[in-house]
Image (cartoon, rainbow, N blue to C red):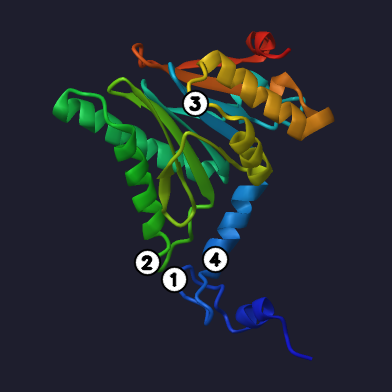
Amino acid sequence: MDMPTELQHQAMGYDRAATMFSPDGHLLQVEYAEKVVRFGSASIGIVCKDGVIIVADKRIRDKLIASESAHKIFEVDEHIVATAAGILSDARVLVDQAQILSQQNRVTYNTPIEPVAVIRMIADRKQMSTQYGGVRPYGVAILLAGVNKGAGHLYTTDVTGNYTAYKANAIGENDEKIREMLRGDYKEGITMEEGIKFALKIFKEVLDKNFDLGRFEVAYVKIGDEKYQRIQGDALKKYIK
């Protein structure tokens, strides 16, 4: 009996290095890292007419954890926030590097950094881990939102180091199901308040009986103000009908 192709690749060692292509053109370690991302809790980002929002599921399962201390949304700069799905320690390292880049830009040019410059740096570091030996791929997808020059911006970078701009997107568990709902119901020109209600409505439908406001946090950056704000806990009740 012939072995399945995937087992043949493993037997031949094509999954032992992130830089080794299998005969059918796959980087198996990178594909494994992509599976890790899909195990992570989901986040939704939306570009609105008055800013950008991120709604993240912290998925806290231990009642002993203080929910307000477990953040899923990171501040990159006062006008840029990011969230992640996958190995959050990998995300923390990338966000630390993004914070340094943002501060260097302010010191050097006396101006806030553009969100696209941050996501490009993160994507470049991810790509390097798939090209050089001795490291493993970053097992995390990053969803980054920010405001620059009077407009909201939303970007996603995957494990391979690609990045793309979006009007609305989701990463993590059930990401494709959530994206289908976004494609069907997202409307350009919604307000941030409407966007938060929309994202929580999607989570409520996806999670069903597991839906609990205590496991969510929201961050938004408003056009004109360009300083991020965070909402969690009881403050989210007004966004649920």
Outermost residue on the left side: it is 109
Where is residue 70 shown, x and y percent of the image? 61, 26
Residue 150 percent coordinates (x, y)? 31, 20
Residue at the image position 23 percent from the left and 32 percent from the top? 104
Q: What is the spatial separation of the Cα atoms under label 3 and label 2, in whole angstroms?
A: 41 Å
Disc 1 to disc 3, how far (Cα)?
Answer: 41 Å
The residue type indicated by label 4 comes to Gln
Mark 2, residues whose alpha carbon is within 10 Å: few (<14), some, or many (≥20)? Answer: some
Alpha carbon separation for disc pair 4 and 3: 38 Å
Q: Can you tell which mark lies on residue 35?
A: none
- Report helix, strand or loop for mark 4: helix
**First along the sequence among labels 1 and 3:** 1
Residue at the spot of label 1: 19
Q: Is residue 40 visible?
A: no
For this view, does 120 lie left or right of residue 201? Answer: left
Which one is earlier in the sequence, the residue at label 2 or at label 1?
A: 1
The secondary structure type at the circle numbered 3 is loop
Q: Are marks 2 and 1 in contact (CB under 8 Å)?
A: yes
Mark 3 crowdedness (10 Å alpha carbons): few <14, some 14-19, many ≥20 = few
Around disc 1, counting alpha carbons within 10 Å, would you say few (fewer than 14), some (14 to 19), or many (20 or more)? many
| Residue occupied by mark 2 | 132
**How much space separates mark 2 and mark 1, taking CA atoms?**
6 Å
Position of 68 relative to 132 (above/below): above
Question: Helix, strand or loop at disc 1?
Answer: loop
Mark 3 or mark 2: which comes first in sequence?
2
Residue type marked 3: Glu
Question: Disc 4 designates what residue?
Answer: 29
The numbered dot on residue 188 is 3
Residue at disc 2, secondary structure: loop
Identified by mark 1, the residue type is Thr
